[in-house]
Amino acid sequence: MKIESTEFAQGQPIGRRYTGDGEDVSPPLNFTDVPAATVELALICDDPDAPTARPWVHWVIYKIPGDARGLPEGIKRLETLTAPAGALQGENSWPSDNVGYRGPAPPPGSGPHRYYFKLYALDAALDVKPGLDKQELLDAMNEHILAEAQLFGTYER
């Protein structure tokens, strides 16, 4: 399985548009070679280089239909989504406005940070509510992961 973006390549800078310094919208993502047995997909984006919370969670989205082959730019910051149909979003690490995608916003002068978009193919529909945090989602996915893929980009202030 593979995850890519048309807006940044593996290990390359994430465009300002997708950061806290820009429009802070989620980047478009494409999924390929998803296992045929996939029932649902889930995605977590985090920053292992954050100085305060490691990792700093930027996005938790799950219950993405198994036949989805990507996510469009600008997923709304809502717990329950109509596009992709049935998808739910959880909590990021921000103290407020903490549902959905929040883009890179590292402390100035802290050097380049890495932002990992981790995609999970699941063999079952998760019986979960909206608003899960990263650990709750990982716990719910336990023993249901068919495949994993990741894409990382960088950002520096």
Image (cartoon, rainbow, N blue to C red):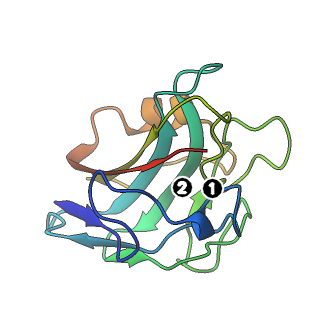
Q: CA distance from mark 1 to mark 2?
A: 4 Å
Q: What amino acid is labelled 2 in the image?
A: Ile
Is residue 117 visible from the viewing direction of this image? yes
Along the viewing direction, whichever of 36 and 91 lies nearer the viewer: 91
Residue 36 lies in quadrant: bottom left
Residue designated by label 2 = 61
Identify which residue is drawn at 61% across, 72% down: 75
Secondary structure beneath label 1: strand
- Image vertical order of residue 76 relative to residue 21, above or below: below
- What amino acid does circle 1 point to? Gln
Picture quarter containing residue 28? bottom left
Say what secondary structure mark 2 lies in.
strand
- Residue 43 versus residue 141 in the image, above or below: below
Could one spot residue 38 in this view of the protein?
A: no
The outermost residue toward the right is 96
Locate residue 57, reporting x and y percent. Answer: 58, 37
Q: Is residue 14 above or below residue 106?
A: below
Q: Which one is nearer the viewer's eye here, 84 or 32?
A: 32
Q: Quadrant of the N terminus?
A: bottom left
Q: Is residue 118 left or right of residue 104?
A: left
Tell me: 42 left or right of 137.
left
Quick check: 120 left or right of 129? left
Spot occupied by residue 141 in the image (x, y as percentages of width and height): 38, 39
Label 1 close to label 2 by CB (< 8 Å): yes
For residue 12, the mark is none
Residue at image location 75% in from the left, 38% down from the top: 94
Q: Residues within 10 Å of mark 1 (few under 14, many from 20)?
A: many
Q: Quadrant of the C terminus?
A: top right
Q: Residue 2: image x %, image y %?
A: 19, 62
Residue under label 1:
89
Question: How many residues crowd around disc 2 within 10 Å: few (fewer than 14), some, or many (20 or more)?
Answer: many
